[in-house]
Amino acid sequence: AMGTVYLGKDPKINREVAIKTLRYEEFDPQQVEELKKRFFREAEAAGKLSHPNIVTIYDIGEDYDIAYMAMELLDGTDLAEFCEKDKLLSPAEVIRIISLVAGALDYAHSNGVVHRDIKPANIMLLKNGEIKVADFGIARVMASSKTHTGVILGTPSYMSPEQIAGQKVDGRSDLFSLGVVFYELLTGSKPFEGDSIATLMYNITTSPPPPLREKAPTIPVVYESIINRLLSKDKEERYQTGRELMNDLAECLRNL
């Protein structure tokens, strides 16, 4: 969705940064202005977030007609690498990560910012063990520019039922997506799959996920109940806040 990511340097303080640009070529000229406006609005909202587990945005701007966002440069890898069956992290480490992401989401949601695209590729595990959530609001910039075409962007594996239905989303949608990530980090497989996007979307909105312990028999039962609650089709039945999820995860760790 976003364009190229560059390594940049802030000359004033000699700090290396990552610079993400907005790619225009896939949009009609009349869409570009609206896209830029949206990009700056979302980037500004995300830029106000200041949390140890959220990627810091230093600057947003436009140069030579290219909109850009300068953010902290991260030394690590995203979680997609740890979703492969032979590279799974320990259950205790997975809980630590999910809990930190839940805390970041709790903070963002209480500041009126919904991520809308929580997936392993947007969660970074740094070499020093820190966790950083990236790309707040970017999904909204891209999706809203294309809604008139009825296109769903990317693979909807991590989307909530309400996102697929095109309904208004709130923080509980992010918690559903985090449930999908949690399931995948523990088992190496996604809770909802399909041989076509239509089947996948049908499964997300109507089918229960395969029981967690069928895929990973050694995982304690309590994990399954937490994940099942996160993956409730009805958002009223999910965890309502990241804080609520963190409390149950802390209890889970005590019982490991």
Image: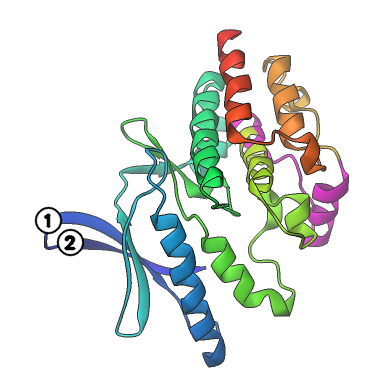
- Tell me the SS state at disc 1: loop
- Is residue 195 in the magenta section? yes
Residue at the spot 30% in from the left edge and 85% down from the top edge: 64
- Locate residue 61: give its quadrant: bottom left
The extreme right residue here reads 206
The rendered magenta stretch, by its main secondary structure, is classed as helix
**Who's the residue at 85% across and 38% down the image?**
208
Q: Amino acid at mark 1?
A: Ile
Q: Residue at x 57, y 26 (%)?
A: 246
Q: Secondary structure at mark 2?
A: strand
Q: Position of residue 210 (x, y in %)?
A: 81, 33
At horizontal 61% and vertical 15% (from top left) the residue drawn is: 252
Image label count: 2
Q: Nearer the viewer, residue 88 or 245?
A: 245
Residue 104, given in percent of the width and then of the height, sits at: 49, 39
Q: CA distance from mark 1 to mark 2?
A: 6 Å
Identify residue for label 1: 13
Is label 1 in contact with label 2 (beta carbons under 8 Å)? yes
Q: Looking at this view, is 112 or 29 the one in front?
A: 112
Name the kind of residue labelled 2 in the image: Asp
Whether the magenta-drawn stretch holds residue 157 is answered as: no
Hey, which residue is sitting farthest top in the picture?
255
Specify start and end residues of the magenta stretch as a single range.
Answer: 183-207
Colour treatment of the image: rainbow
Category of crowding for the residue at label 2, using alpha-carbon neighbours closer than 10 angstroms: few (below 14), some (14–19), many (at least 20): few
For mark 2, what is the residue?
10
Question: Which picture quadrant has residue 18?
Answer: bottom left
